[in-house]
């Protein structure tokens, strides 16, 4: 695969950092983050920090995944949702709206978290 490398400012206080557009969707991915080729990162979505997006996970619209967060399986993060810190989102979980998932929080299974929700600390949402 051919990536076009550049710099991008994720507006996280670190200024412009080495980054590239993900080939499956065109979203910005910091070179410090990891996104599998099978995952989708939409053109306005961002993945940065040490975050990992694996499997068939989909990050799109204005969603952001950062810090040491891990999103995998068939999970979808979209709208203005943010997943950061050490948060985990996996399975068929969906995180949308203005939801923030952070800390050591886990959203898994078929959970659907939306609206202006915050899932944080050691909270776990499953369904």
Image (cartoon, rainbow, N blue to C red):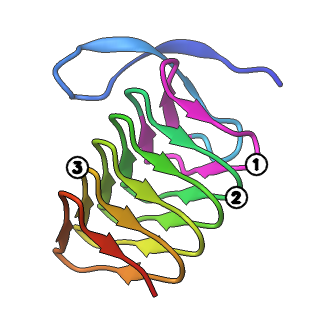
> 93 left or right of 64?
right
| Residue with the mark numbered 2 | 56
**Quarter of the view holding residue 16:** top left
Residue 57 against residue 65 in the figure, above or below: below
Earlier sequence position, callout 2 versus callout 1: 1
Q: Of tags 1 and 3, which is closer to the observer?
A: 3
> 27 left or right of 118?
right
* Image coords of residue 19 (percent x, y): 49, 19
> 102 left or right of 56?
left
Magenta residues, as a range?
27-47
Q: Of tags 2 and 3, which is closer to the observer?
A: 3
Q: Are marks 2 and 1 in contact (CB under 8 Å)?
A: yes
Q: Are marks 2 and 3 in contact (CB under 8 Å)?
A: no
Q: Are marks 1 and 3 in contact (CB under 8 Å)?
A: no
- Residue at (64, 67) in percent of width and height: 74
* Image coords of residue 21 (percent x, y): 58, 30
Residue 125 against residue 102 in the figure, above or below: below
Secondary element at tag 1: loop
| Residue with the mark numbered 3 | 103
- Residue at (76, 48) in percent of width and height: 38
- Magenta includes 30? yes
Task: Give the quadrant of the N terminus.
Answer: top right
């Amino acid at each position: 695969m051919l990536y076009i490398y550049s710099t991008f400012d994720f507006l996280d206080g670190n200024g412009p950092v080495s980054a590239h557009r993900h080939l499956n969707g065109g979203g910005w991915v910091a070179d410090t983050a990891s996104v599998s080729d099978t995952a989708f990162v939409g053109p306005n979505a961002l993945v940065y920090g040490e975050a990992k997006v694996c499997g068939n996970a989909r990050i799109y619209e204005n969603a952001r995944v950062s810090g040491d967060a891990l999103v995998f399986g068939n999970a979808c993060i979209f709208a203005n949702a943010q997943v950061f810190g050490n948060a985990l989102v996996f399975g068929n979980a969906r995180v949308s709206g203005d939801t923030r998932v952070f800390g050591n929080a886990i959203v898994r299974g078929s959970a659907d978290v939306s609206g202006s929700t915050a899932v944080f600390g050691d909270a776990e949402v499953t369904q």
